[in-house]
Amino acid sequence: MINIYTLNRDANKEFENVETSKKRFSEAIWREDIEFYRSQYNYSKANYNNNLAEISEKWQSIGIVSGIAAISTYFTWKQSNKLKKPIYKETPLLSDAKVNPVLMDKTVALNITIKIR
């Protein structure tokens, strides 16, 4: 993007040079002045046209890259929506242990049951 702004700035400067050369060319009296301002006008005009072509090319490449990025993002999003979302489910794999408090004759005891798989 910075390069495009630089090219815009340069194109504006060249446009100003074209306008001043054109004005001086139309006001010139001597043959040497007329040839000098004509060559300066042609040079500035060529630079201006080159800057415009580069700016157009840069914007076109930005448009192509943006389009490719949008399309790839869309297809990635569509594929990610098809994936199963993981659900956490606690299942012990080695054993199943339970601890239950049991009230026995004025005392509390713990009943531990273990199922070994």
Image (cartoon, helix red, strand yellow):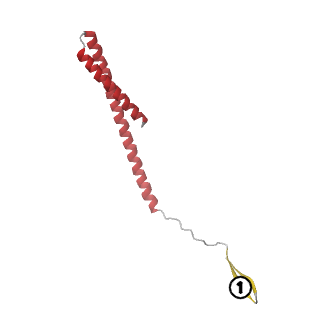
Position of 33 relative to 1 (above/below)? above
| Residue 24 pos. (x, y %) | 27, 17
Residue drawn 44% across and 56% down? Answer: 77
Type of amino acid at the residue the image marks with label 1: Val
Position of 95 relative to 76 (above/below)? below
| Residue 10 pos. (x, y %) | 37, 28
Q: Secondary structure at mark 1?
A: strand
Q: Residues within 10 Å of mark 1 (few under 14, many from 20)?
A: few
Residue drawn 38% across and 47% down? Answer: 67
| Observer-nearest of 70 and 116 | 70
Number of labelled discs?
A: 1
Image quarter in which the N terminus is found: top left
Q: Quadrant of residue 103?
A: bottom right
- Left or right of 87 in this view: 51: left
- Left or right of 73 in this view: 36: left
Image quarter in which the C terminus is found: bottom right
